[in-house]
Amino acid sequence: MSAEQLLSSVPESDTVIVADLEAGIGTLTRLPEASVDSTLVIVEPTPRSIDVGQRAVLVATERKQGHITIVANKVATHEDEERIRTAFGEHPVVTVPLDPVVVAADRQGASPVDVDPNALAISAIGGLVPVLIETTDT
């Protein structure tokens, strides 16, 4: 089932759906306008990723896809984080550090939370919870 089909089949209610969409902006362009409450744009601190992220923010904004939060992923340095914060100035940014636990888990075919539930990246991802709760409460 595509994201478009999934979202169009959800009844008007307090249903919460978290979907990991394909990279890029294709799915955002096909979603019905104003069909989600919150959009997370995952960006790595590379020029190409930032460029795609900025295009995703434009599309999500134009199509009224809810509150937009930037997830700065695989951040290794303060400069990485600043590069992303500067590129997405008006949007909140949740920073997820480059974490060797995530790399090790990927090599093992395991979830990082199963490898080390106290990993830095896992803790940082927990920072999304208040952002998403605030989004659904408004």
Image: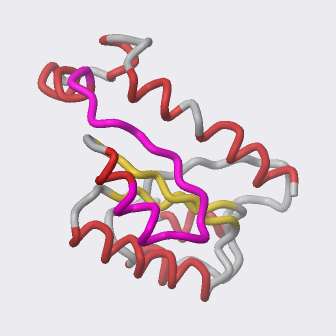
Magenta stretch contains residue 87: yes
Q: Is residue 114 above or below residue 133?
A: above
Where residue 55 sits in the image (x, y, percent)? 41, 81
Left/right placement of residue 136 relative to residue 36 reads: right
Where residue 27 sits in the image (x, y, percent)? 44, 73
Q: Is residue 132 above or below residue 26?
A: above
Q: Is residue 83 above or below residue 124?
A: below
Nearer to me, 103 or 19: 103
Number of numbered labels in the structure image: 0
In the displayed orientation, state which residue is furthest to the bottom: 62
Q: Tell me which segment is drawn in magenta.
A: 82-101
Magenta stretch contains residue 105: no
Residue at 59% across, 66% down: 91
Residue at 37% across, 52% down: 81
Q: Is residue 135 above or below residue 48?
A: above
Where residue 69 sits in the image (x, y, percent)? 58, 59
Quadrant where the image shows the C terminus? bottom right
